[in-house]
Amino acid sequence: MKTSSSNKEDYLKAIYENNGIDNFVSNKTLSLHLGVSPASVTEMVEKLKNDGLLDYKPYTGAKLTTEGLYKTIKIIRNHRIIETFLYDKLGYSLHDLHHLSEELEHVKDAVFFDRLYRYLGSPESCPHGGIIPTEENYREKALTPLSNYKVGDSPEIGRVMDDASVLNYLASIHLNVGDTIHILEVDTFNEVTLFTINDDDKPYHLSHKQAQFIFSTL
Ligand SMILES: [Zn+2]
């Protein structure tokens, strides 16, 4: 079972990853990303607001306070340093990184993370394309969800959220960070987008839900 503090951390991460630095992130978005009911979201964001970590406006959503931002930078930084280590040096696959990184990011020794970061060659991003943030440089480079694109657009995949089902699906169609997709059709009734990858003619589909977990730099 999850402890309430790790649960709070999941909320902070989800708000950060949906650009809750500059904008308010809606309860609906958090509910989708965390896989919890809107009522649970309301309850938890109220708690985090009382902790001084979030600004929260009902019907608008949640945004990180300065204190919340610095706390989240630390969590995300440690998580992504561990991910990069597991992926680059130990050969773990993208969708196997999550659980182990969640465990290892709680190591208390800050020097350990600094040393590991230098050992890895001071990487700028994690294997999912997320920035490895510092207190000076913490904005994700890929911030536009694929759900914002139209027929004829060709966004480049810049970042994928650490969600097991989305990562498994992307692995099954061989869609990776750095690939360009060409959008052929957006079917709003069935909530599916059809696209091709790079120079390949074979069409693939993505649900509108999945498209909210994948971001482009444009
Ligand atoms: Zn990552």
Image (cartoon, helix red, strand yellow):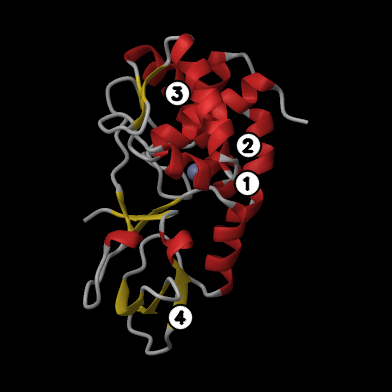
Label 2, secondary structure: give it: helix
Of circles 1 and 4, the one toward us is 4
Determine the CA span between mark 2 and mark 1: 6 Å
Q: Are marks 2 and 1 in contact (CB under 8 Å)?
A: yes
Pointer 1 residue Cβ closer than 8 Å to ligand 1: yes
Determine the CA span between mark 3 and mark 2: 15 Å
- First along the sequence among labels 4 and 3: 3
Question: What label sits on residue 72 in the rendered view?
Answer: 3
Determine the CA span between mark 1 and mark 4: 25 Å
In this rendering, position of residue 157 left or right of residue 31? left
Say which residue appears at 45% left-offset and 80% top-offset. Answer: 204
Determine the CA span between mark 4 and mark 3: 35 Å
Q: Are marks 3 and 1 in contact (CB under 8 Å)?
A: no
- First along the sequence among labels 1 and 4: 1
Position in image of residue 60 (x %, y %):
32, 33
Residue farthest to the bottom, as pictured:
201
Pointer 2 residue Cβ closer than 8 Å to ligand 1: yes
Query: Which residue is the site of mark 1?
Result: 97
Residue 112 to residue 91: above or below? above
Query: Which residue is the site of mark 4?
Result: 204
Label 3, secondary structure: give it: helix
Position in image of residue 215 (x %, y %):
35, 54
Label 4, secondary structure: give it: strand
Q: Is residue 213 visible?
A: yes
Position in image of residue 40 (x %, y %):
59, 32
Q: Are marks 1 and 4 in contact (CB under 8 Å)?
A: no
Q: Amino acid at mark 3?
A: Thr
